[in-house]
Amino acid sequence: MTDGRSNQAAAQLVLARADALRGNLADDFRDDLVEATYDEAQAIAERAVRQVRAPRWNLDLAVDRLVTSRIFGLPLMLVLLAAVFWLTVAGANYPSALLMKVLFAVEAWGSALFESWSIPWWITGFIWHGVFRAVAWVVGVMLPPMAIFFPCFTILEDLGYLPRVAFNMDWLFRKAGAHGKQSLTMSMGFGCNAAGIIACRVIDSPRERLIAILTNNFVPCNGRFPTLILLASIFVAARFSPGLASFAAAGTVVGVVLIGVFFTLIVSAALSRTVLKGEASAFTLELPPYRRPDILRVLYTSLIDRTVFVLARAVAVAAPAGAVIWILGNVTADGVPLARHVADFFDPLGRTIGLDGVILLAYVIAIPANEIVVPTMLMVYMGGKIMTEDVTGTSLESLLVDDNGWTMLTAVNLMLFSLLHNPCATTILTMWKETRSYRWTALGALLPLVIAFAVTFTVAEFARLFGAG
Amino acid sequence: MANCSSCPDHADCGPPELDTRGFDGVVALAGNPNTGKSTVFNALTGLRQHTGNWPGKTVTRAEGGFKFKNRRYKLVDLPGTYSLLSTSQDEEIARDFILFGQPDCTIVVTDATCLERNLNLVLQVLEISDRVVVCVNLIDEAKRKGIAIDASALSDDLGVPVVATAARAWKGLKELTQTVVDLIDGKIKTAPKRAFGDGAFQDAVTELIPLIDEVAPDLPNARWVAMRLLDGDHRVRQALQSGDLARLAARTRGPIEQASPLIALGGTQ
């Protein structure tokens, strides 16, 4: 730009003139201006709006008194959360088992077909026991819970419940030096942390927005729920009578979510007292009227926009991951599969935090998407075996406990690690896009990882101290 | 750009440049949060942008198109805002688009059940643009609450067309599109309600306008910039100083999303 300098000078001139003119104005001209707008709006509204009949008994207000009450507000929220998880756990159990049965039958049928065509074993293995199996696991484990969870969540959202959650949780976040709307962004994080981080734009103050972005990961996203549900079902629910099993599993998941909320608050408080110092800013949050959800739209949004979208992303990651796992499991060095070598390498570290090498390997492979943690783990454990029977219940338990030495400590620590560990690659990328800062992105990625290791290590040490694990 | 298409938010983030090829006009949707803007957007475009019952659902700009009498219009759903003066990013996106995106028409969606509060934003939009249609939405909800809205009185007061709708029930939408198209075609003339403040303030504004025109000749609304400068709006100051304002204005329908951080980073927050 050749005239950049002269333009800049002209701009300076405008600003100087504006400053001079402002000096001439009355001291409170700003307030006058704002007030004039308000007065005008009021005058116009008075002419255009008429209350033709007294409003009927206000149901919204009555419901709000209960939902946002000091005594019932938070418990009611927990009950709703537990109900959604219970529906998800109980409802997904049977379809999941059925779906797996069908998909693994397809795997067996497909590989048999390939063999009958005398296609080389490694092609059959790569396609059917690698790529297909990983995709089958992801679909089988994820589809049923998502198809239940997302509609439930969308109904609550369309009903207008989320701002009430923010209202109830506000005092907690204020104590942590964070913004009350952070609970809205956390709610979005249940679906997908990347979406939750984008939702942080509703927070005006850059400081509080950063806190919300950095801590969103402590809300378990949909990619992590299947892990939690599976572990809760196998290790917790199985210890209860069948009638109570699903309640126990749902209760466990709610417990994990609450631990996540606890860490969100602790880390928010720590951030707002160290690198992101400041007071929580005041804000007004409108509690919208309750609206009857449009069922068709709920189904469309939750099934097409959310379920299929998340599932498609998971499948897109699972297919190449399945290929990698198959190669790691079938290419040998010194007569031992590569997967074993890598798992053995991670094993000492894994054992220290109450997990094992295979689990850490699964988390490394699952950096692109959390959804593939369980499939990766199980595929490495299973090796070449084909699972055709009951793939969600007892045989899975025996694979983990009898064949691979899992204990209650492994299950608990895996749930904690799943909750607290580093965000997936998409989420990290979103953090960078929203903050445009490598420093904050690195903090957002590494802080949870450090916390995950510290917490699981502490739990493992305590367990060992008391002779468990 | 490979990263962009693989990003999960690709769908709601849209292309960084507003692509107006193949469209006969651009219409923006503004309004307070939770007035049903996204519902109006979906009803007009036939798209299914997610609508959620909480203020601040739409934090990015959603785009779609609608057809009316063989002409195609691009519809841009802006984040819901209470004002165009504040500091958050969503308000920034909305205000930048109305200011620099130069839409052929801006529909301000309001909630009939609390019109007074919504009118603040309407009045602010009228300060920036004269091509405005006010949509009084949720008229069905208002009726249930025993509230009646006199649309023609409202229209007389504001100086722009007013259409009552119940977007969830598909009511009033045809009239809304007809009005928007008529306004774009110049069949409807508007005389927006403006000019608040005492004489000294108005004189100051009038004096600044030609100066601003010199620095940023293509600016669609120098008057509004003058008001913001007098108010001491840091970001508008910075944008003028750095030449961003002139550059942005020169680009008709330029990349708004990129403009936003430029202004946002320059400001003191």
Image (cartoon, rainbow, N blue to C red):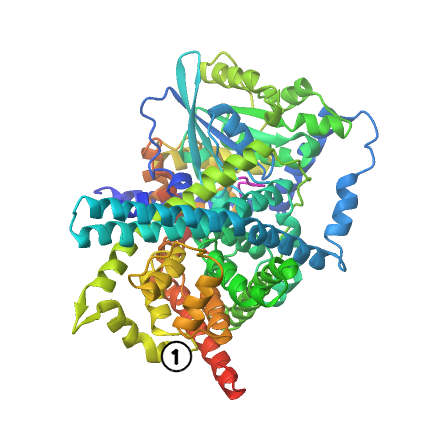
Q: A10 left or right of B47?
A: left
Amino acid at the residue labelled 1: Arg
Q: Nearer the viewer, residue A9 or B15?
A: B15
Which residue range is magenta in the image? B80-87
Q: Position of residue A324 (x, y in %)?
A: 25, 58
Q: A44 left or right of B268?
A: right
The residue that appears at 50% across and 31% down in the rendered structure is B29
Q: Position of residue A11 (x, y in %)?
A: 36, 44
Residue sitting farthest toward the front: A116
Inspect this view and state whether residue A304 appears: yes
The residue that appears at 37% across and 58% down in the rendered structure is A375
How many marks overall? 1
The residue that appears at 63% across and 33% down in the rendered structure is B119
Q: Position of residue B139 (x, y in %)?
A: 67, 26
Q: Is residue A443 magenta?
A: no
Corner quadrant of residue B185: top left
Q: A437 left or right of A238?
A: left
Q: Relative to A44, is B230 above or below? A: below
The residue that appears at 34% across and 27% down in the rendered structure is B20
Q: Nearer the viewer, residue B203 or B55?
A: B55
Q: Please identify the dominant SS of the magenta region.
A: loop
Q: Chain of mark 1?
A: A
Judging by the rendered image, the residue that carries numbered circle 1 is A351
Q: Where the N terminus of chain A falls, by quadrant?
A: top left
Mark 1, Cα crowd under 10 Å, few <14 / some 14-19 / many 20+, is: some
Q: Nearer the viewer, residue A176 or B5?
A: B5
Query: In terms of secondary structure, where does tag 1 sit?
Result: helix
Q: Position of residue A83 (x, y in %)?
A: 64, 53
Q: A374 left or right of A126?
A: right
Inspect this view and state whether residue A261 appears: no
Q: Nearer the viewer, residue A418 or B158?
A: A418
